[in-house]
Amino acid sequence: MKKVLAFCAFIIALTACTQFSSEYKRTKQENDSLKLQLKKGEVEMDEMLSILNAVEDDIQSIREAEDFLTIQKDSEFSVSKREQIKNNMTLITETLKRNKQQLAELQEKLNASGVKSSALQKTIDRLTKDLNEKGETIVKLQSELGQKDEEIKQLAQQVEGLNADVQILEDVNISQNERLNEQEQTLNTVFYCFGTKKELKEQNILTGGGLFSKSKALEGDFNKDYFISIDKRQVTAIPLYASKAKIKTNHPEDTYNFHKDPDGNLTLEIKDTTKFWSLSKYLVIEVG
């Protein structure tokens, strides 16, 4: 009887040990699984927080770029500043697009994780709203800057047109001044020649003249190439390289005189150029 009882006790103990070992393994497996899930949850949470921090940093960068654009829309654009504005616009647009995609992926992860975090959900909602508002602000700024750029282009076209008008006026003014200078030069250009009676007659500058008559100057078709042109405002003395001289054209006698140098050669000195040339633009001097 004792042997039977002892055997039964052994069987019961063995069964209890087997059941304990199986329960232990099951409990351990569940514990390990919970640890893995907890670790996975922590990793996912870290990833989500990292995304939130990156989005927050991007939003700060957008604010700084937005402040710059807000200031620039009321100022004049240089070429370099336009390029900087264009680069900032591209940066903001790409950053907004990336952040919206990140928040959408974050929302999906949060929903799939089963984590119920009202604080995290509020942060996602706040950032999504902030990004949408920034997007609207940037669109408005782009419109204002585009309008200003168009105004600048129109002003540049007007300035270009005014510059063209100014250039035309300058060209006209230059042309008029050239014509006036030419006219003034023509008005002040006079001609003179000197030579012996024979030389002047050969050029048909002196005609007639005989035993009882005086020769006359510049009657008929005379040789104009024989004359020297001068500016009456600048020439007041004409060397004649002769000891005798007589003016054959009509010039007031009180406007000139002859000066003889030590060698006995005469120089015509004009005292009043305006009055001297008032009666004739041609001066003929007979020397001998």
Image (cartoon, helix red, strand yellow):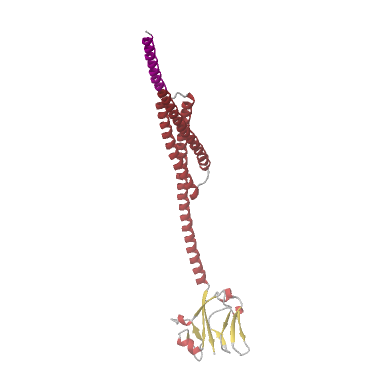
Q: How many marks?
A: 0
Of the pair 150 and 85, the residue shown nearer to us: 85
Q: Give the range drawn in magenta.
A: 2-27
Q: Can you say whether 51 is above or below 271 in the image?
A: above
Q: Residue 143 lies in what quarter of the image?
A: top left
Residue 14 magenta? yes
Whether residue 233 sits left or right of residue 14 in the image: it is right
Residue 6 magenta? yes
Of the pair 54 and 218, the residue shown nearer to us: 54
Q: Can you say whether 56 is above or below 87 in the image?
A: above
Residue located farthest toward the top when viewing the structure as drawn = 1
Q: Position of residue 13 (x, y in %)?
A: 40, 15
Residue located farthest toward the bottom when viewing the structure as drawn = 211
Q: Where is residue 266 in the image (x, y as percent from the top left)?
A: 59, 86
Q: Where is residue 239 in the image (x, y as percent from the top left)?
A: 57, 84
Asked if residue 285 shows in the view, the reply is: yes
Residue at image position (47%, 87%) is 201
Asked if residue 208 shows in the view, the reply is: no
Q: State whether the magenta stretch is mostly helix, strand or loop.
A: helix
For the C terminus, the quadrant is bottom right
Q: Position of residue 65 (x, y in %)?
A: 50, 40
Residue at image position (53%, 86%) is 286
For the N terminus, the quadrant is top left
Q: Can you say whether 31 is above or below 90 in the image?
A: above
Of the pair 45 and 195, the residue shown nearer to us: 45
